[in-house]
Amino acid sequence: MRARSVSSFATGLAIVGAAALAYGSLVERNLFTLRRFDVPLLPPDAEPLRVLHVSDLHLTPGQRRKQQWVADLAGLDPDLVVITGDNIAHADAVPALVRAYGPLFRFPGAFVFGSNDYRGPIFKNPFGYFDSEREYVQGAELPYEDLRRILTDAGWVDLNNARVTLKAGGKAVELVGVDDPHIERDDYTSVAGPVDGAADVHIGVVHSPEPRVLDDMAADGFSLLLAGHTHGGQVKLPGLKSLNSLTQPTQEFLEGFVSSGRTQMYISRGLGKVVLPLRIKCPAEIPVYTFRSYPNRTEI
Ligand SMILES: [Fe+2]
């Protein structure tokens, strides 16, 4: 009798697990959500500025629905597009990325790269993430110089260890970015320094949301940092740490707003997935921020 109960419990668990996997791989993985935030960054009486934040597409040539969904974001008519890396996941994905970003190229834009712009995906044992001593392995090299050339030819600013002030929505927007700190390509010292007081708004851009990058940019007076990389955890099962949180230096830097002093960083879940082809309790997202002058940040 007891053996039968254990067997029934195991069968039930297997059914629930299979259902969760099916839901995560067939349904939630394809739930692309647009999130809108009002952020009080502008001086009094300033006109709003709309900033679209695109991250972690991990695009492959066959992902036509994702390409079209991203292309349709042009309908938001953003003043500025910021890309926080991990654009492609296949050596032949650059033309697909152009299909996705093409309609956005008519807006001012800036980008940094993530580790997965340099190297493609490779199979990793999910349980290996529980081993803090595991060796960091990467896939085959991706055409990141082709990607860089296409984005810069479109007029977007390469912010990999760079700093610029550009015009967007009639405002002077100071941007600073670093290459991906997750693979130690960041060099903030080469671009460090107090913000330009003549600019209207000061934004930092980074792929992996490392606390030290937030602290450095906050010390220089940047108001808001935009980041991706974590996929928000991607797979969140009850009672367990989320899959992608295991690669992060601190569990707080997983998704949403975090802060250092008066500086905030928004960590986007992005649109893609890694290691496992599913998302559970962590739908993909693209945030669009409306910078305003009034004092309360709200999600609308
Ligand atoms: Fe990513």
Image: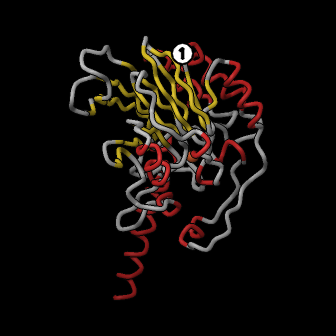
Q: Measuring from the top left, give residue 237's x and y in whole percent.
A: 40, 61
Asked whether 189 or 185 is in front, the reply is 189
Q: Tell me the colour scheme of the image.
A: secondary structure
Q: Residue at x 35, y 42 (%)?
A: 263
Residue furthest out toward the bottom: 2
Q: Residue at x 35, y 49 (%)?
A: 260
Residue 208, compared with residue 18, is above or below; it is above
- Decide: few, some or many residues near mark 1? Use Cα within 10 Å; few <14, some 14-19, many ≥20: some
From where the camera sits, is residue 58 visible? Answer: no
Which of the 4 image quadrants contains residue 211?
bottom left
Q: Measuring from the top left, give residue 81's x and y in whole percent.
A: 51, 24
Q: Residue at x 49, y 40 (%)?
A: 270
Which of the 4 image quadrants contains residue 15?
bottom left
Label total for image: 1
Quadrant showing the N terminus: bottom left
Q: Amino acid at mark 1?
A: Phe
Asked whether 233 or 165 is in front, the reply is 165
Label 1: element kind:
loop
Q: Residue at x 43, y 52 (%)?
A: 280
Name the residue carrying label 1. 107
Residue 41, compared with residue 184, is above or below; it is above
Quadrant showing the C terminus: top left
Q: Measuring from the top left, give residue 284's x and y in whole percent.
A: 46, 41
Whether residue 73 sits left or right of residue 12 in the image: it is right
Disc 1 residue: CB within 8 Å of ligand 1: no
From where the camera sits, is residue 98 visible? Answer: yes
Residue furthest out toward the left: 295
Q: Measuring from the top left, give residue 141's x and y in whole percent.
A: 78, 46
